[in-house]
Amino acid sequence: AVIGRNQLSRLDKNNQKRIKNHEIFLANLDETIFRTNFDCEGSCNYAFNVILREPNLKLRDRLEDAMRESKIEFRRGSAGGGNQMRQPYLSSVVAEGAWEKFPEVEHIHHYGWYVGNYPDLGSQSIVKLCNILNNA
């Protein structure tokens, strides 16, 4: 609780940095490969959402290899473990294969990543990240 309260004084400033970081990220990500047309009005993303436009397993694997080689921390499927309907804790509630009725969630599960948007990231680091992703 003490750490959280200490961070409150920096919250607005850090959120403004995250908003600017996200703008730089989307402006430098190749929109022919990745989704970039997010409605960001009024939002502050704590992550750079990297989502392939089209399913492509080879590109997915190259991207993950490139991020690992570059020591970029990521989580596939977004922050919460991907498609929650696939998670074991819901197996008694969700029928096997029910997730197939949700193709958008499935796409993000297989072809989307969460990369942290830290307020101390500089614009050069964000452009470098985009170059790594764009050229994988």
Image: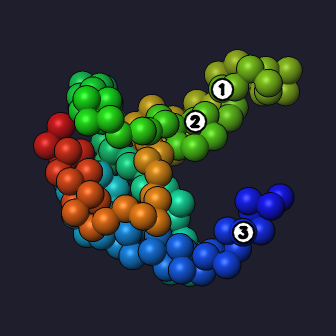
Provide the residue designation for mark 1: 86
**What kind of residue is marked 3?**
Asn
Q: Locate residue 6 relative to residue 52 in the image: left or right.
A: right
Find numbered disc 2 in the image and state the secondary structure of the residue it sits on: loop
**x then y, percent, for residue 45:** 52, 65
Q: Find disc 2 in the rendering and name its residue.
A: 82
Q: Are marks 2 and 3 in contact (CB under 8 Å)?
A: no
Place residue 72 in its image quadrant: top left
Q: Earlier in the sequence, mark 3 or mark 1?
A: 3
- Quarter that holds the N terminus: bottom right
Circle 1: residue type: Arg
Q: CA distance from mark 2 to mark 3?
A: 31 Å
SS at mark 3 in the image: helix
Residue drawn at point x = 38 percent, y = 69 percent? 21
Residue under numbered circle 3: 6
**Labels 1 & 2 near each other (Cβ < 8 A):** yes
**Residue 98 visible, this angle:** no
On the picture, is 124 further left or further right than 1? left
Q: Nearer the viewer, mark 3 or mark 1?
A: 3
Q: Residue at x 47, y 46 (%)?
A: 114
Q: Find the distance from the CA under tag 1 to the CA under tag 2.
A: 8 Å
* Image position, residue 57 (x, y; %): 30, 26
The correct choice, above or below, for 50 with respect to 120 in the image is above
Q: Residues within 10 Å of mark 2 (few under 14, many from 20)?
A: many
Residue 113: image quadrant is top left
Q: Which mark is residue 25?
A: none
**Residue at the spot x=28%, y=59% of the render?**
126
**Sequence order check: which comes first, mark 2 or mark 3?**
3
